[in-house]
Image (cartoon, rainbow, N blue to C red):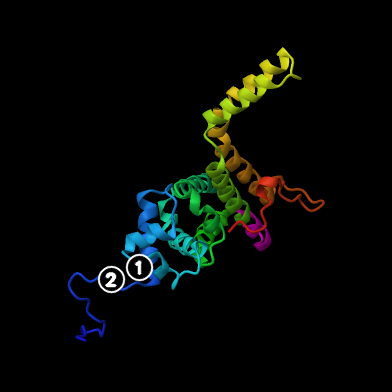
Amino acid sequence: MAQQPDDTPRRGRGRPRRLSRDLIVEAAVGLVYEDPHASLTIKSVADAVGSAPMALYRYFPDRDDLLHAVADRLTKDLKVSITELSPGTWQDQLREWMVLSMESLRPYPQLLPYIVSTRQPAWLPSFVILTRVLEPLRLSEDDQALAITLVGTTIVGQASMAAARRPADQTVTVLRSALDEADERDDTDRAEIGAIIDRLPQAFDRLYDTAIDATIAAIEALAGPPAAARRPGPARLSAPMSPLFSNPDPW
């Protein structure tokens, strides 16, 4: 067989590209970019590379393994550089980074569980950026690790909930219907609860901003009061915690 100068075998004219793990992942990523909400299956990826589905199992034992590989590749691509952040306080930069990160994750709902449990060190750039953003606080290593975990849990938790939650108008319709059918509710209850239900779309819109505010406040609590306001006394309190931030493995 004729060889190229780099000893890579030539492909005959019209011959399909030799199948490889990288080629399969590349095709799968292309499908995700083309339609993030279309279910990524072994068959759809096999069609994209011009191969039989069974051939892909030589490289990926199952669909989960393929989706893990796709998530790893996407996570490496979804980087927000420190140079992309606007000048400002650490709070401003952290807020901007969290918003950009959410926007990067939101288009890929089917991959979120795999992005969270990525087996590659794809989150390392995020650790570097957050360490630099939080540097003015001069946190201890323990508190800095906790602060970064808080940020990651907030982003991934909110992205996962947003992906799983039905659209706000559908939620309102379902809850309104259930409220109308609830015999035990009097007219006063119906009016009060109905008014809250009607405001759920606005609440969903405000939810992530509120979660960011809570995360920043928790990190501020880790840093303690400004130096001028500190007084000798008991050790400062730890950051307030809530179930939202309690995921022990957010990355």
Residue 41 is situated, as x and y percent measured from the top left of the image, at: 44, 57
The secondary element bearing badge 2 is classed as: loop
Q: Residue at x 76, y 49 (%)?
A: 237
Direction right: furthest residue: 234
The overriding secondary structure of the stretch rendered in magenta is helix
Q: Secondary structure at mark 1?
A: helix
Is 144 one of the magenta-colored residues? Answer: yes
Q: On the picture, is 121 further left or further right than 187?
A: left
Which circle's residue, 1 or 2, is located before the other in the chain? Answer: 2
Amino acid carrying label 2: it is Arg
Q: Which residue is mark 2?
A: 17
Q: Height in image: 231 above or below 208?
A: below
Q: Report the side of 57 relative to 184 (left or right).
A: left
Residue 225 seen in render: no
Can residue 140 be found in the magenta stretch?
yes
Q: Amino acid at mark 1?
A: Leu
Q: Which disc number belongs to residue 23?
A: 1
Q: Quadrant of the C terminus?
A: bottom right
Q: Please provide percent x and percent y for residue 112.
A: 52, 53
Query: Eyeballing the image, is 121 above or below 218?
Result: below
Extent of the magenta region = 137-147
Viewer-nearest residue: 230 or 63: 63
Q: Quadrant of residue 82?
A: bottom left
Task: Tell me the CA gap for discs 1 and 2.
Answer: 9 Å
Left or right of 113 in this view: 100: left
Asked whether the residues under the numbered discs 1 and 2 touch, taking CB atoms below 8 Å apart as contact, a structural biologist would say: yes
Estimate how packed mark 1 is, as few (under 14), some (14 to 19) or many (20 or more) residues with alpha carbons within 10 Å: few
